[in-house]
Structure formats: C-alpha cells, structure tokens
Image: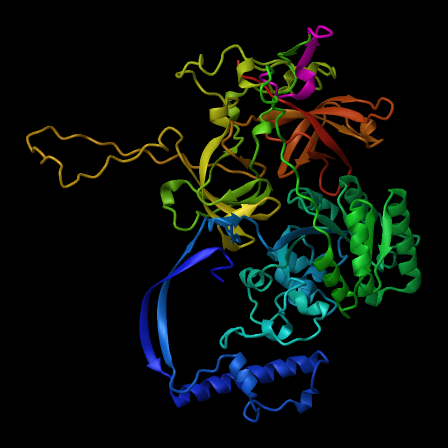
Amino acid sequence: MAEKLGASVTVTRKVFVKTVEQRDVDNARSKLAEHLVARARGKAKNGRGKHLKDVPDSADYEIDPADEEKFHIPKLGAKLWVAEALIKPYDGTNGSTAAFNENGGVHIIEANPTQQLRISLTGPTTCGKSTLLGTLTTGDLDNGRGKSRLSLLRHRHELVSGVTSSVAWEIIGYKPEASPQSIDEADDCGFFGTGEPEEEAEEPTARVVNYATGNISSWTDIHSAAEGGRIVFMSDSAGQLKYRRTTVRSLVGWAPHYAALLIPANDTETEDGPAGLSEASRVHMELCIKLGLPLIVVFTKMDIASKPGLRAVLIGVLSILKASGKKPLMLQNSGKIKETCMAIAAEPEAAVPIVFTSSVKGDGINLVHDLLMNLPMPALPVSPSAVHPLPHTSITGVENGIDDIEIVGSGGDIEIRCLDSDAEDDSDDQLTTLFHVEEVYGMKPSGIEANSGGSVISGHVRYGKVSIGDKLTVGPFYAGSDIGHRSRSATPTPTNGTPLLSVSAASYRGMLSRSPESGDESPGQRSPHRERNCYEEEAEWRLVRVVSVRRLRLPVTTLFAGEAGTIGIVPIDEENEDETPPPAPTSGSQPIDIRRPKAVSFELDPPEELRLKKGLVIVNRGGWMKAYTGFSAITRDPNAARGLVVGADVIIYVASVRTVARIVTVEPAVKDEGTRFVCEFLGVEWVELGAKVLVMKNRPMGGGMEVFVGKVEGRLRVLGG
C-alpha cells in the first residue's frame, strides 16, 4: 500500500510479542471456518455454488490446506512481532503514484485513481426519487409506502408528510472493472490477509458497493472498497413546485454531470384528465432540456402501471425529446449498456437513455447500477488563459486578444500597437484555482483553535486543485453600508460613486470591469490611509489558508478539478503572514542585564472571523479578483423578450450563486442572435464569463416555474468614487 501511494516506510522499533501456541492456531481455524461458511451461504443465496441446505455448519466444515495458506493461518511455534514504522509520502498529494525515471529519481503523478460522477435526481413530487435512491444505496426493496427512503429525509416535517423539501446526498461505489477482486474477497474481513482471489466470472452486481455490501457502514468504507473504480455522488431534490428553488439549486449548484429525470409510469392514472404526460413532469423535463444537461430518463412504479397508461406517458416523453433534438435510447437489458454508453460518449447532449424500474419488485435496479458504473465521464472544463506575446516580439501588454491590436502601415513598414480599450479586462486569465462554495457549516475545522475564525465549507473544484496548506482568497464580501441605495425603478438613478446604468445596450459596455491601472490613480499612487470601501479588492476578498480537505467525507490532502468535497479554512492576515518570530537564544548569546528596561511585546489580534455564505468562490492568489454588481447575458429562449420585464425582480442562479437581481434592460432578438438582457445584483457577486445563468421569475410559493437559461457575456462593476 505504501509503495502504491508513493511513500517510503522506515521501521523505527520492533517488539517481540509471543510464540504461536496450539490454541492460537485453533482459534484462527475456527474464525476461518466461520468466514468460509458465511461466504458459501452468500453464494448459495445468489445462485452460485452449492445449495443452501448443502452448506455445513462451521463446526463440521473441513478447511482445505490451500485456504490455510491463502488466509495466512499462523504456524505453530512461529514468533509474532509488533513493528512501529514511519510512513513518509514523497509529496503531500493524495492518491499520487511514484514512478522512477532513468536517473533513479522519483516522479510523482498527481491524480485521483477513483472517478467521481455527480448525478442529480429530479422529477415531479411522488415520482419516487427518494425511494429509488434509498433502494440503490441500501440494497433493500421498498414496501410500497416509502420504507427505503426514510434514511434520506432530513427534517421532521418530511417524515410526517412524506414530501422532500431539501437536498439530500448519498454515494454509491463501483469497483474497477479490471480489478481482480471478487465478491469473495470483498466479503473478507481482512483478518486473514488478502491472499490471491479465486478465478471466477465477475457479475456486474459484484462491482456495486453500497450499505448492503459486507463491512460497509459509512461513506469512508465505500471509498475504501471502491478505490480505483468510481464513486457516484447522487443528490435528491424536491419535486413540488413550491420548493422549486431547491430543485433548481440541485441542478445548477453542484454542477452535476448528468440529470436523472424520474417519471412515474402511472403518471396519468393518478390525476383526472386526458391520458399522457402530466404537467408537472413536463415542467421538470423542459427545465432539464433548457439547462442543457446530459439527461437520463428513469420510469418508476412499473409494478402498479397499466400498459395503456405507460404507453401514453412514454409517447409524451418521446415527443418532447424528439422535438428538442434528443435521441431516445431504450434500455431493456444489460447487453445494450456498452452500446448505449458509446452513443452517449459520442453525443452527450443528444443521447438520452431510458430505463424502466420498480423499487418494490426490484425490476431494473441492477440495470440502473450497470448504467451508472459505465456512463462516460464528461471532459473537465478548461481554465481561461491569457493571450501572451510571442518571444522576441515588441508586443507588450496584450491580454484581451486581437481586438486590442491595431495594425498601422503597409508593406514592410507595418507597426503593431496595443490599444487602451475600454472593453472588459478581467483577471480570469490568472485564474488557476476555482472552488465554488455550495454549503457553509456551523463548525470549526478539527485541530484548530476556537478563536482562529476558521470555517468548514463544501462545494466543488472547477479549475486546478485545493491542497492542505494552500493560501487562497475567498470572496467577494459585501459591505452594504458603504454603498448608496439603488433605485428600484426601471431606470436606476445615479448615486455618489455609482455610474448610471442606462437601458441602452451600448451604454453598459463601458461599465464592464477594467484593470486596476485604468482608473484615475494607479495602485502605487493610492493613499495608504484612504478609507476602504466594499468595491476595493482588499475589502472584497480575504486571504485564507486551507487546513483540512475531505473528498465526500474521506480525509485527503488534495481535492482535484471536477471533484466535490469539504475544506476547512482559517483567515490569515496578509501583512503579518510572512513575519517570523525572533530566533531563540543560542549558547553563545550574551547574558541578560536585569537593569535594562524590559521590552514590551504585544500579541497580534486574531484575524477577523469570516462571514461566509453560499455562492462565494475560493481562487488562487495570482491576482486579486473583482466583484461584480451585475452581468449581461444572451438567451435563445423565444419567450424571453416577452417574459423578462425591465425593472422586475428575478432570482439568478449561476454556479453556486443564488441571489435576487433586477432586470435593467432587455433587447429583443435580432435575426437569430438571441435576446440580450442585463441584470443588476442587490449586492456583489462573482460570476464567470461564459457561465450558464438561469433566471427565474420571483413568484410566491406555488406560482409555477418559468425560467430562462442563457450565457454570461459581460460583467458589470461599479467603481468607487
């Protein structure tokens, strides 16, 4: 194990314990017999091996000498020792492997061998989302009244009403396909060592690691059993429209790789009306299609559905999918899994697998497991990079691409100049690490002092990686007292230090963020005693140090791009972070004169406690990021020009950001370019260029779900006066 992790082992102490006696051998034989009998009975229940009645008791079981050698039964007269060893990793990364180069040096490959796939369950209320998730994670079938979902409900009112109102998470593990492990070795408690596995044909269900697997009681156990394979992180969500914000959050915030849309097979048999897809199911399906997420359709409650009702629902689903340019792929058995997954890999946004399940009878459950363990992993997003001048050229300061380059002259007298454009000059080109904060927990990181101001947060890494000891920046923070009140009218009024937001499309281009040097004073000219406001980088962002990292509750040292987890951070003072205490006096130091005046030392105040919230981001220290008060976006929705009203309040979802904003301007679509609109936040947020944005009308509970999905084209920033 140490060599696999790229670590060195040094034995520091070795202590003799005892000599193996006959009773020790008999005790080990007895435990081995119990283990082999339990394994044989498990095979018999699954139809593999002997019949259940032919399996003898542990007292009558005859142990084969090969089993004694395989499971390391101690030999009579052997000496037992206890060793104390120091295991030292080569670098601090988790899951790294060591490779030796030609010169004998060690090259560490930083990678997590276990894949992490995120899937969000969505669908109308009472479609069986929590029940299916409970059956997949526990291995127990439902009793028809929601027994398998009880462990997923987080609130008392959910237990009473049976309606999910919050987001719940669970994980399922899948062993690697090429691994020689079998069910026999998975059931081994580890007391007798690993040994060589038996050569048997591995069934697909043998790769599943959930709470029904032996010796699995926590997420950490699932991580350990599925090492090198795949961990599927599944999030449950609410189905009722009055909890629509929770539904959208599970589909946007955690950046799921796939959305699993659950539709009851008896959808139309529970409501009065014509046969076909219900309105609630149609709304959830259209939401997934608008978000552009790779889709999986799962029909539930097949045990109580009639053939005419199922046919009507299926026709409605297929018509919507085909109208949206999707390609439905029916999955009837595991023989088509490979072919279906290859089609998904070729067209991830078009191919839609359809599975039929029943959590009561167990129909299709193994098929869902087989699909989850074979779904292709989407490609990781690529971090933005700057356009740098070529070596040995005279072009300097080029950061915004060819739009900032002017070519003057002709023939051999060509001069290239870099223009001082007012277009947006973001610091995204320096972005190498990006962590979206999705949850903030009311606890301190373990092993940290209570007055350190530390916090534990969860989210996912979009770019780069987050390791223990990293110094990063978190923000943006909003100080509302330093900002003038913003008008609630359709056309905002100017305030002190706040430019006017015009309803003209051309006017907001000048409000896009500029580099710090483009203002009236450069950073070197800014007075150090000038009062900070919330629009200055020092007030918007805080420096923190990462003190703990967990990958879905598994303690690790590094969280890589595309992975979700929790991290513990503590604030640090940038001015004093490099200060070191004075050196301790050595033997050659001069004696202290007691008549000398004593030096008075003042202990530094602890850093101010972080006031974290959902929607913040953690980025690298390459350059202070900016905070934005709004954004401009474009949507292809044909109803956007009529549905988006200037001056109306809407709810904005961008990555982990969920906030209220006001629509400033709407430009109807010209030709096929789409509808452009500008929104202004009530506070400050950080959004990424090109990010997917969802705009939801701010309606009361039960007011329906009317959303518009677009893409961020520009970001608005109010500069302090």
Above or below 75: residue 367: above
Q: Residue furthest bottom?
A: 60
Q: Quadrant of residue 603?
A: top left
Does residue 601 sit above or below 362 in this rendering?
above
Residue 297 in view, yes or no? no
In this view, 479 is above or below 442: above
Q: Choose top left, top right, bottom left or bottom right for residue 695.
A: top right
User: Relative to 449, is 204 on the left or the right?
Assistant: right
Where residue 486 appears, x then y in whole percent? 61, 20
Q: Position of residue 177 (x, y in %)?
A: 68, 63
User: Which percent across, then down, holds residue 143?
Assistant: 72, 70
State whether residue 422 is above or below residue 93: above
Instruction: Point out the stretch of residues depicted in magenta.
Output: 396-413
Q: Residue furthest left?
A: 595
Judging depth in this view, the residue of 109 and 269 nearest the camera is 109
Q: Visible in this render: residue 286?
A: yes
Q: Position of residue 623 (x, y in %)?
A: 51, 27
Q: Is residue 593 magenta?
A: no
In terms of depth relative to the viewer, which is nearer, 464 or 75? 75
Q: Residue at x 57, y 50 (%)?
A: 111
In the displayed structure image, the side of residue 116 where residue 276 appears, left or right: right
- In the rendered view, how is the structure colored? rainbow
Residue drawn at x 38%, y 83% as measured from the top left: 78
Image point 85% across, 46% down: which residue?
Answer: 326
409 magenta-colored: yes
Outermost residue to the front: 102
Residue nearest the observer in this picture, 421 or 251: 421
